Structure formats: C-alpha cells, structure tokens
Image (cartoon, rainbow, N blue to C red):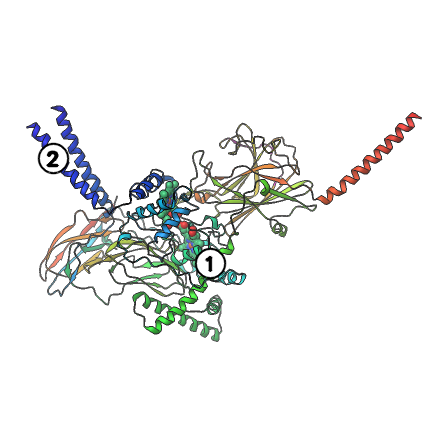
Amino acid sequence: MKTKMLICFALLIACGFGLFVFADDHEEEEMNKLVFSKETYKTMKVNNGGKISGVVKFEGEVPEKKKLAINKDPAVCGVVDKFDESLVVGENMALKNTIVYLMDITQGKDFDKDAKVELDQKECRFNPHVQIIPVGTALTVLNNDKATHNVHIFGTKKNGTSINKQQTRNRKRMKLAAAKGAEGPVEVKCDIHGWMKAWVAYVPHPYFAVTNEKGEFTLEDVPPGEYKLGYWHETCGNNNKEPVVVTVAAGGELKQDFTLKIKK
Amino acid sequence: MRTSIFVLSIIIFLLFSVIFISYAQEAPEVSERGKEVYEESCAHCHGVEGRGDGSAAKNLLPQPRDFTGGIYKIRSTASGELPTDKDLFDIISKGMPGSSMPEWESALSADDRWEVVSYIKTFYEGFKENESPPKEISLDGKIPYSEESVEIGKFFYTQFACFECHGNAGRGDGTSAPTLQDEWGFKSWPANLTENWNFRGGSSTEDIYKRFIGGIAGSAMPMFEDASFGLTIEEAQRYGQLENKVEMTDTEDEEFNTLDEKMGNAYDILDMMTEGLANEEQKQKHAEAMKIFQEKSWHITNYVKSLAPEKRPEPAIGKNALRSQYTVDTLPTIDDAAWGTLEASYFPLVGQIIVEPRQFNPTIDSVNVKSFYNDTEVAFLFIWDDRTNNTEEQENEDFGKTYEDAIAIQFPVKIPQDPTAPKPYFLWGGKKAVYLWQWKASAVNSVTELTAKGITNAEVQEVQGDIQAEGKYTDGQYRLWVKRALKTDDKKDLQIEPGVFVPIAFSVWDGANGDIDTKRVISSWYSFVLEPVPSSRRFIYPPIVALLSLGILVGLRGFVYRRNS
C-alpha cells in the first residue's frame, strides 16, 4: 500500500514539474514587455468616449542624479551637462517616462495621423527618452549635431534582428523602415557616444501615453467598457501580472494613479 | 479508496503525458541527423535549446550565439535581415577567428553541416515566416586593388567615420572603442583592421565589403549608407576640404552650400525610397547616387585591405627566428629611421589558461620585434597593439576594473647547449630559472630585471643592471625600445653571443581587458640570434690568422734553429 502511495505522489509531482517547465519558458520573456491583445486592432469612430487620466509617482529613496561622463566630441557633446535618464523623478515624486496604456483594447480610434514620430539627436542626447511608435509608421531620426552618430535599435523576436545604422553629421534626417509587428519597448543606443540611450515601443493602437515631468498621463476617446490598465517603466518594471481593471463610462472621466518602486 | 487514488493519479499522468507529447509534436519536423550533430558538437556551447547557454559558455566572450533571437553577425544580407543558408553553412565551415567558435570543415562532412544549418534554423520563428529569401548585398562594380584606390579609400574611411571606433591607423583604438558593448550587454572591441586574420567573417575583399554595407548585427558595428550621398568622389573630397576650413570665402561658402543642398536632396530621395514614395525621376537619381556609393565603398574596402599584410606572418622560429642585425655604429634609438630597414619578426600570443586567474578572451594578437647589435650591445624594438593606454588601476562602473598595461620579455638564464636540449618551463620557468625584463606603462623609461622559477614565483633582482629603455604609445600601438650590454657581470643575467640561438618568450598584459598577474596573454618559446657578423669581416680575419700563424711558425723555426746551432 505504501509503495502505491509513493508512486501516486511521484506521478503527481512529475505532472506538476512538467507544468512548471512549460510555464517557465514563457514567463521569462514577458518580463520587459508590453501586453497587447492577440486580436488585430480595428479602428472605428468613437463618439462620447471616456477619459482616463492620472499621475504616476515614485516611492522610495530617490537616487542622486547621475551626471554622464562625456568622453567624446566635447565641442559638440560637452556644452550642456547631461544626466542619466533611467529614473527621472520630479517635484512631488512625479515619475517621468512611464508608459501607461490599455492592454486589451481591440477597437477604438485611429492614430493621430499628423503626430510626428521623430527621434532627435541634439547635443549628443536622444529626445524623447521614451516614445511610442505606431506599427507601420517609419521613424524619422534627426541629427542636429555636427557629429556622427549611429542609431542602434536593439533586436526583438518579433521584428527580427536589430537595426544599426550610421548617421553621419552630413545627414540631418534619416527614415528608418517601419516595424512589422507590435513589440517593445526596445533600447536605442548610439555606440559612438556610449552614454546616448533611449527607448522606443512599437504599438498597435493609440491608447498609449508617456508620463510628462509632472508624472501625468491622459488616455482620451476610450470607448465605454472594461479594460486592463498597464504601465511600463525602464527602471520600475511593469504590472503585466496584476493590471488595474478600470470601467470607462460613456463620456465619463476616470482617475487612476500609480505608485512605482525600483524593480529588484 | 486508496486504490482509486492510485488509479486516478495514473490517469492524470497519462493525460498529461499525452498533452506534453502532442505539444512537443507541434514543433516543425526537424532533421534527425541535424539534431544529432548539433547535440554532439554544438550544444555544450550553444545550449541544447539553442539559447547560447551551454555548459562551456560561461567563460566565453563573445558569448556563443543564442539561436532563438535571430541575430547573426556574418551575413551577405542587409541590416535587419536574416542570413542566407549559405552564410550559415560558410560560418559553420570556417568558424569565427578571434572568438571561440571553431571551424567544422575538418570535423563534419558537408552533408552534416547542411543538416545542422536546417536544425539551428528551427530555434527561431523568423526563419519560417520569411517566405521570400532575404535580400542579398549586391557586389556589383568592384574596383580592383590599386595604390590610387587605397588613397581614395583612406579619405572615405575618415568621411564615413570608421575611425570613431577603428582608430586613425585602424588598430581598433578609436575614441568610441572603450565604451562599446554588444546587444547582450558584454564588452566588445572594434576589430583591429591591421590583423585581418582575426576577422570573424573572413578577410577577402568581398567579405570586408559585405561587413560594413550590412553591418555586424548584435555588435556596435553599424551598417553604412553614404556619408556624402549624391556627391561624386571629387565633390565629396571637396566637401570634406571645405568643411575643415576655419574660414571660408564667399565663393567657397556658396560652393559648400550647393554641395550641401545636393546631398540633402539625395537623402530626401533615399527616405522616399524607404517609404516607397519615389517617382521615376527620383528613382533614376537614386540609382545614380547608389552607384557612386558602391564605388566609394569598394575604395574603402581596398583601403581596409591595405592595412594588413597579405597573410598572417609566420611565427619567429626555425628559419623565421628573429635575427638581430650587426652594425658597426652606435645602436639606433627608438625613433631612428634605421628601424624602418628591418622586417619585424612575429611572435603570436594566446590567453594564459593554465593557472588561475586565466584569460579566455585575449585582446592582444602578437608582439613584433626588430633588433640590432654591435660589438658590445644589443637593442630591441618590441611592438604590440593595444586599443587603450592604461597607466593605472581604475574602477569603471560599466566595465569593471581595469589595470596597468605591461609586458615581460623572457629568456633562459643559461642558454641550452643545443636546440633540442630542454629549456626552462615556458610559463616563467620552473626548476630551471628564467631571466625577465619587465616593463610597465606607468614607468615608460625603465625595465626591471627579474628572476623567476614559476609564474607565481618571480623575484626582482637585487642588482639591477644597466639597461636602457624607452616606451611610447601612439594610435593603438606600444613601441618599447630596450638596450643592454651583450655581457654582464651578473650571474643571474643572460649572456649573449653572436651566432647562438637564444630562446625568447613573452607575457603581455592588456589592463583594459582585465589582465593582471597570471591573467595575461603569453607565448611559448621562440628564438632569436645575433646574426653572425657579415661575411666581409670573416674574410679579413682568416688571412690575418694565417699570416700570424705563419709568422709564429717562422719565428718558432728560427728559435729552434738558433737553439740547435
């Protein structure tokens, strides 16, 4: 009898282990990612949509602002002091550069067709530090420096291998081919000036916002309904595992704040 | 009751088994042979699941490729594209020099290599989705190698900003070099273009051309578009000239603006091409500009090609041993033009992996040596490439600790009787001691004499002989000049004689690569010899000796004669 019990036990453990192994495989990959619906996003006219807004704040000891060492092209790059932007905390602990978005929306308004999708290189700094790019839209990279840069957008599994293109000081603007699928955020670097870093996220729908200096975000024209509200921050991670569920009423206004800590 | 639990758990188990098996079978059909070859030959580095995490991976830099990501360095396709099957086959066949990726041409049959190509492609979805084969880089318009082409290429090497990473002389010592990382977050160094036998993807003209047109994915090395797009070669050179002028006259200013505008237009059209918006006329213009871009690129390729010798030099042993040249004059100093008349001898180096801490990822390829001697002294010029000049220990946030650069030149204390007699252990001696000259980048004008009986058992000699030294660092290269008397009074020193082959070996430390103590690059024993005095002198001596002996004989005969009488 005892042996039978033992075998039962062993078999069940084996099953559990199998599950564990399969789960583990995928979880690791989700760590640094935004969540999108598997359904293709459909655009429609949104009348009387709702609005979600809020403030993202930082909790914990604010690390001292780190000044970047400019070891290259000082005449162009060293004029203005530059600081590490991986955690920018403003007044009242406001957290800049957090992406806030709807994870599971499948239909709604179209992208703002006039919005510029530009990444500027000026005084050897990328601006903006975090930005979203509609899938299928080319990114224009500007070079406002009398220096040669290289735009290195790291590889992702969906969009294939990385992009790394030289942009010499003679080339003021350069269009990079549109990404194939929604993915990100991915790191952007200039290897020539190793301190230059930024992030871009390729997104399938327009319900995305990046927080400003005051930590504020706004998502407008949201069709009424229930949604998962997600965030991502370079240093503070994401809430992919426990998104906030919000219910948007027609013409309603909804407030949702977040408080983020440094990801361990 | 218990029996039913038992039965239930068996049922659950079977159920799960079925699910897992069917899950596993969803994967595409894999080549059985490819899998077998992979697991036998590749998995210990690249990992069973292709994640680059095999058991041998952890010490290796660059790390073995993670095949689940679709990033391949060596491609004949544009940036952002996957490699062709042929690219994969070739890189597996030839290996990646300068990294731990071995060549498999000699160990695996061509069929097996093709099988393993199909197998590694199953690790990454992207290969399946690619219906059309990736676009290959066109090799049209190749320009044959010539001095003229090299000269033009040199200009574009600067205008295209290769020097930012690869340095002015191409030794991988550009000002951006110290901060470069690969996409996996590891330190990576730009290639030393003067040692093209270490190129990952081969050193043929076509190989080099493809590398910078397509970029090296996963590394800092970008793909290139024309830095003076739309301008002819002459216009581009003129633009470069004007750009460097501190002050321009009004006509020059106008000329510059015209060229600038022409270039701006060409770039605008390029952007439209990217978006598929160009009209016929623009397409025409673009094609013309691309043709000139190709020309410029072939010139750059020829320039890069010109930086390295035709092939990797033969190591300094046997007939290639370092031969110190006799001169009657005083020996040349470090910057003397006389050094230019000698060919350097080549001493290859490898990472020290016998004693902890080890160096698995060496950054220094070799030491090159020239030497002169006269009746009393010998002078050496030791030359080696190092991408950075580190003169002290430093803590770096991104790359950890760096140390001081250094070199040690090793000789036996006693020269073995003949070339086959045992020498001291090559790692700084053992029972038999070695005699060393140690030089450090912080004290460029002195060498210290050491005696060692093992790599961790070295002593500074109490009596430091009269050795002159001078070290210089320029454009990614150290030159160390050392002069010493052929003979010394110190029993612990090496005594040097013309015509006798002397074993010589090296240890070099690249502080930026974490080299310190036993972590270093080393050579085994090679040899050098003071090339016996030129034959003209040999011709003078024998007659003198003959005359003298004749004189003695005559004198002796006279002496005997006189005594007898």
Q: Nearer the viewer, residue A41 or A250?
A: A41
Q: Is residue B462 magenta?
A: yes
Secondary structure, mark 2, is helix
Percent from the top left, x then y, of residue A23? Answer: 20, 42
Question: The N terminus of chain A is located in which quarter?
Answer: top left
Residue B91 appears in view: yes
Q: Which residue is mark 1?
A: B301
Q: Residue at x 30, y 40 (%)?
A: B48
Residue B185 appears in view: no
Q: Residues within 10 Å of mark 1 (few under 14, many from 20)?
A: many
Type of amino acid at the residue the image marks with label 2: Ile
Picture quadrant of residue B24? top left
**Residue furthest right as drawn:** B565
**Residue furthest top as drawn:** A1
Percent from the top left, x then y, of residue A218? Answer: 18, 59
Q: Which residue is mark 2?
A: B11
Magenta part of the chain: B457-467
Q: Residues within 10 Å of mark 2 (few under 14, many from 20)?
A: few
Secondary structure, mark 1, is helix
Type of amino acid at the residue the image marks with label 1: Thr
Disc with the residue nearer the chain's start (2 vs 1):
2
Disc assigned to residue A213: none
